[in-house]
Image (cartoon, rainbow, N blue to C red):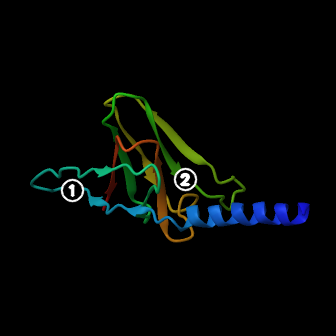
Amino acid sequence: MKRILIFGLAFAVLAIGAAISMADRGTITALTAPTNYATSASSITWTTGDPTNGHKVVLTGREVVVAINNGSLTQGVTVQSVADKYGREGDSDYIILGSSQVIFFQMFPTHGWIQSDGYLYIDVSSATIGVAVIKFP
């Protein structure tokens, strides 16, 4: 009886894990930054944060993530890294945003940041976070 119960619990945990990993991240289309001789400015289009599924953007190594906290409470943004050839472990770049704060991250190189599917993963703690990605030429 104990073996059946343990097997059942293990199966339930695997099923829940599979269901969570099946969730598809929302794809953000990177905005192209104006060139050196642009005749006008570009506006930022914000994607509403999805704390359940997260976000992804195609990573070429020329992208900068920008986030805004539209809420009144402190929230967080995480950009997921991966283990690299220098032995660094895959860890996350986590930034806390105060109310109405706007932040931007570094330009993310592909090495150490690109996931196995070719994307950069961005997670937010609340739907009050707006996310944009700007790709530099």
| 2 and 1 marks in contact (CB < 8 Å) | no
The residue pinned by badge 1 equals 34
Instruction: Quadrant for the N terminus, please.
Output: bottom right
| Circle 2: element type | strand
Q: In percent of the image, x 34 and y 31: which residue is there?
A: 101
Q: Residue furthest front?
A: 1
The percent position of residue 73, horizontal first and vertical second, equals 39, 28
Left/right placement of residue 39 relative to residue 30 reads: left
Q: Which residue is drawn at the image coordinates 35% and 61% (left, top)?
A: 28
The local secondary structure at tag 1 comes to loop
Q: Amino acid at mark 1?
A: Pro
Mark 2 against mark 1, which lies toward the viewer? Answer: 2
Q: Using the numbered discs, state the Cα–Cα distance from disc 2 to disc 1 in whole angstroms.
A: 27 Å
Residue extending farthest to the left is 39
Q: Amino acid at mark 2?
A: Gln
Q: Is residue 27 above or below residue 108?
A: below
Q: Residue at x 65, y 66 (%)?
A: 15
Pick the front one: 66 or 24: 24
Pick the front one: 47 or 95:
47
Q: Circle 2 sits on which residue?
A: 80
Residue 79 left/right relative to 31: right
Q: Position of residue 17 (x, y in %)?
A: 64, 62
Check disc 1: other Cα within 10 Å, few if <14, some if 14-19, many if 20+: some
